[in-house]
Amino acid sequence: MGLRDLFGGKALRRGVHVPDCKDLTGRLPIRRLPFAPMLVVPLSQHAGAPAIPIVREGQEVVRGEPIAKANGFVSVPMHAPATGQIERIAPAPSAKGDLAPAIYLKPWPSASQEILYGAPQDIERMSPAEIIAAVQETGVVGLGGAAFPTHVKLKLPEGRKVDTVLVNGCECEPYLTTDHRVMVEQPKEVLHGARIVMKAIGAGRGIIGVEDNKMDAVEALRTALGAATDIAVEAVPAKYPQGAEKMLIRVLLGREVPSGGLPSDIGVGVFNVATLAQLGELLPRRQGLIERVVTITGPALAKPGNYLTALGTPLRWALEQAGCKEDLASVILGGPMMGPAAGSLEVPVTKGVTGIVAFGRHDVNGRPRRIYPCIRCGACVDACPLHLNPSRLGTLARKERYEEMETDFHLNDCFECGCCSYVCPSNIPLVQYFRVSKQMNRERKARERAGANA
Amino acid sequence: MCGKELALAPEARIAGETLHCKLADSIAGLPQMAQARRESGLGVWGKYPYLWWLPHPELSKGIRMFEYVIAGGLMAAIGAVLAAILAFAGKKLYVYEDPRIDEVESMLPSANCGACGQAGCRAFAEKVVQGELAPGKCTVSTPGGIIAIANYLGVAAGAEEKRVARLACAGGNHVARNRAHYSGLDTCRAAALISGGGKNCSWGCLGLADCERVCDFDAIHMDPHGLPVVSEAKCTACGDCVEVCPKGLFSIHVVSHRLWVACKNLANGEEAEASCEVACTACGRCAADAPEGLIRIVNNLAVVDYSKNRLASDVPIQRCPTGAIVWIDAEKGPAKGIEAKKITRKSPLPVEPADLPVSTPR
């Protein structure tokens, strides 16, 4: 036991306590959402190159059949989320607001929707390289929201070793209970997925970190674990943003990810529980990711719940199924701290959507909040889990000194958790400033590169 | 030697007898003087033993005088050496610079806008004096100013055609629909990062005036419908608006590019028109009416091939049903064709109600 444990235990030192609002759905079992009359499967649901469609318009596909192949290593294939017919391959609204190419799939109402695709494979006999290739085939990406292809994380650069796999079951965002229910209902799949990942990455031990507001999940995992000692389940005090991988590593292992580095730099691999549950379920059967658990919740819904949702289900359909009341004002993809507001209800559920939070007209104040000047109270500095100085960064962003923010104040370490904006008494939209600043820096660098090449 | 004398007979020194030593003697005798002082046990030195190296206040003014002279001489010597180095460097490292560069620079507007393609007015002046660029390349100078530079250098003014920024969108809030209401940081950049802003057309102008703020020449103003209007007279084609627009709607064109497609919507015709009343629906009438190859339909959008600009006229715009393609007249501004749908609405369109969900709980 180190000094860290003596003083304050394993709690996150910075961050904020947010009302968790998880009671709406935390005890509701996972149920299946009906298929929408039209599923829109975007070709880019993940970080990396968009997939390449391998179906034609008018083609009939069965559920689970690959409909798009990976374009390179940092890319994953797509699988048909339902048995039906490919209507067209055309641009569709995306969560980013632009139109991105997507496959329109019309499910057949009379189809049995059995997953006939796939073949059993024995993970025990597979080498790590084979497992990595098989993981790419399943199309599994980080289901915690980042949607980074899982197989890319498993493939370590030469000479790098990972000794510990952290399984992230914190789910610190308010409202979301996806990971919670997955842990309670599919603990065996989570453990199986964790062992697959440990084998592929060559790690000797695994730790599942769960926030202590989900003790039933801890119980379920410990029961499923039995006497096995390769994986430990640890409860960590609930505090936002405990579920950020850098925070979890620091609390569970006492290691710090270097600025601009990756967890694998310090011998850790972090995976989300929902990702591992899907892996544990799909990989032995050699099937593809076609659906995911989405917490559809919020005060505007009559029937909030944890729904097993086919990828490509439009938000409008999902909200209607969850009993949307008429006075909808704001729909957030993911949790309310980090998730973007949806600009259109035609946006489909993709692999990275952990939740849909709907607020009615009476739940949110529609008027823009007035932004007051910074009073230098330092609340944001106290809240920032990365020990950055959001106040100074915000001031610089207002002055459009974007380059200085990056070089002198570590702008790129900010992972936009939103703690600073949450605590700011002056309503300064700090995270929005930082997003703009990061984008301006990216564009400036692209221009400089273009200028250097020209 | 007076130094020796000093050392041997401190009392004598105090009496001020042997004070007219030469400068050199004084220097040579300093350590001995100090020694003598310590030994003499004079009051001040007993109190401040660490000041042994200073001339005793009781000692004569003459010796201190000499020390001032030493110090002054040293400073003068250092100054002389440094001055010599500077003088040498000034000769050795001298670079001849054409005095006309300064003169030309002073005639330029000092806007440092970069519209000429150079790093600033100074860089431009250098190129002009070298004869690589014509003075007319500067689009910010007045015609009189350019002629003055040309006359000063004795070169041709160079008939550089004026270039301006053009906006490829006509979707003000009275014609373009919004699918969502954006509230947050009041800039286009910030709005574009949240689901692309509230506009239904994901290519369209967000109307939060980033371009108006970034323009150093007061050439961009927002019209009542939240659409930027570029003043051809004031625009210097510096390109700041091109960089700042998150939707990439601005581009720099020579003013003779009068045939202009004020739309970037790549959606198919019906979808485009559903989101904006002045969108290009890719009907192809302009392409059919234009001389061969001047206008093509690429990705559901009419594209003007400006290499054939001399064939351009206001004929192709006449049958455009939405008025997406316009003829930008030098005096009257953009003009739509006669068949373009007339827009009489002045008030902004409401946020699309059809995009809110209909409650069908089961």
Image (cartoon, helix red, strand yellow):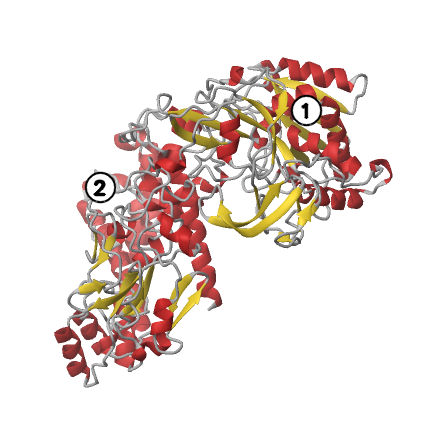
Q: Report the residue that reaches farthest toward the left.
A: B144
For mark 2, name the chain. B
State yes or no: discs 2 and 1 in contact (Cβ < 8 Å): no
How packed mark 1 is, by other alpha carbons closer than 10 Å (few <14, some 14-19, many 20 or more), is many
Could you say which is closer to the camera, residue A264 or residue B270?
Answer: B270
- Do we see residue A405 in this rendering? no
Drawn side of residue B146 relative to residue B29, left or right: left
Where A374 sits versus A187, above or below?
below
- Badge 1 is on which residue? A208
Which type of secondary structure does the marked residue at label 1 adopt? strand
A311 left or right, relative to A400: right
Identify the residue shown where x is 67% and y is 34%. Answer: A268
* Residue found 73% across the figure and 37% down from its top: A115
User: Is residue A258 left or right of B315 when viewed as pictured?
Assistant: right
Q: List the single residue furthest toward the front.
A: A110
What label sits on residue B59 in the rendered view? Answer: 2
- Residues at marks 2 and 1, CA–CA distance in whole angstroms: 86 Å
Q: Is residue B274 above or below residue A236?
A: below
Give the amino acid at mark 2. Answer: Leu
Report x, y in % for residue A383: 44, 25
Residue at mark 1: chain: A
Secondary structure under badge 2? loop
Q: How many marks?
A: 2
| Residue A153, x across and y down, in percent | 67, 41
Determine whether, in the image, residue A255 is placed left or right of residue A397.
right
Q: Residues within 10 Å of mark 2 (few under 14, many from 20)?
A: some
Residue A89 picture location, percent across and down: 57, 52
Q: Position of residue B324 (x, y in %)?
A: 31, 60
Rendered-image quadrant of the N terminus of chain B? bottom left
Identify residue type, mark 1.
Answer: Ile
Q: Is residue A397 above or below residue B301?
A: above
